[in-house]
Image: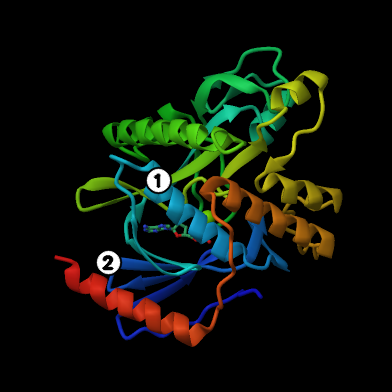
Amino acid sequence: MSLLHSDFQFRFDTRRHAGKVRDLYDIEGQLLVLVATDRVSAFDVILPAAVPAKGQLLNLLSAYLMQQQTAGIPHHLLAVPHPRVSIVRRCDPYPVEVVVRGHLCGHAWRIYRSGERSLCGVELPEGLRENDPLPEPIITPTTKSRIGHDTDLSESEITRSGLIPADEWMQMRSMALELFRRGQAWAVERGLLLADAKYEFGYVDFQIWLIDELHTPDAARYFWAEGFTERQERGEIQVQYSKEYLRQQLLALNYSGQDDMPPPALPETVIDELAQRYRLVFEKLTGQAFVEADDDPLAMQVSIEAELGRLLQSLP
Ligand SMILES: Nc1ncnc2c1ncn2[C@@H]1O[C@H](COP(=O)(O)OP(=O)(O)O)[C@@H](O)[C@H]1O
Ligand SMILES: [Mg+2]
């Protein structure tokens, strides 16, 4: 089963927004209900497709990893009243996506392949192949644009332009690097390699919080760990768990997010493969079998509302 849109009516002061894949309900300006749908996006465009259970898999995985990997780092998660739904602290999001890269993949590889050796102000060594590990993780931030495509930034552009105050940026970058280190250690013990990841942070109550999702295959890139190095040495293809698989399928259909072209329908086999990959990463990283839950909107509404009532009461 899949869920593409939600339309909850809560008895609290509510503002509804739709992200590309999640529906957001701002509750009393204090809480946010994040509903992970089965929508799929690539190249910043929503595709005419649904990947069954994707929203449940991503929401549950993110909630699980946020509980496991954030010791000492404030995070926004308060409750998970349904496998698709997280209730979080509403923060003011910083206008930057903090990307940490431990390997040369995706966008970074495409820049490198073009002959460029500098990315977001970071110098890259010569002689790297696609997917090779970098000498150490690097930070390659992008703008978080409301509309259109994200653009690369250097750390000094972020602070010199005043986009983020320097002291807050320093905290954010060290939180991101620490989360990445933990994410890598977590993955490798479970048979996957964490190659890169994107973090979002927000501000509220005089501090910086980790927001959005953590280390899901929509916000990160994993490789199959066993045999990775041998495949690199032989120049073989790596199996990867990330949005790159979807991007490759779309590129094969001559689609890369062009403004003058509607996104194509995805073949059934691609949808199945996507669903399987999301499930595999969930099961590997949590060590749990995934059992799809019912998406009855009325039952969801009742349990979300009950949780909201409890949380609003406990707020100062
Ligand atoms: N705690 C939070 N406070 C405010 N905004 C948040 C929080 N957590 C996530 N968000 C925002 O909610 C949106 C999640 O929905 P998503 O479908 O990923 O949207 P987008 O199309 O912007 O990527 C993102 O824009 C993200 O920045
Ligand atoms: Mg998003």
Helix, strand or loop status at disc 2: loop
Q: Is mark 1 within 8 Å of ligand 1?
A: no
- In this rendering, position of residue 75 left or right of residue 149: left
Q: How many marks?
A: 2
Residue 68 circle label: 1
- In this rendering, position of residue 307 left or right of residue 148: left
State the residue at coordinates (47%, 48%).
214
What is the quadrant of the N terminus in the image? Answer: bottom right
- Residue 66's x, y, as percent? 41, 49
- Residue 31's x, y, as percent? 31, 67
Helix, strand or loop status at disc 1: helix
Residue 166 circle label: none
Q: Is mark 2 within 8 Å of ligand 1?
A: no
Along the viewing direction, whichever of 263 and 299 lies nearer the viewer: 299
Identity of the amino acid at label 2? Gln
- Residue 283's x, y, as percent? 59, 52
Residue wearing tag 2: 30
Identity of the amino acid at label 1? Gln
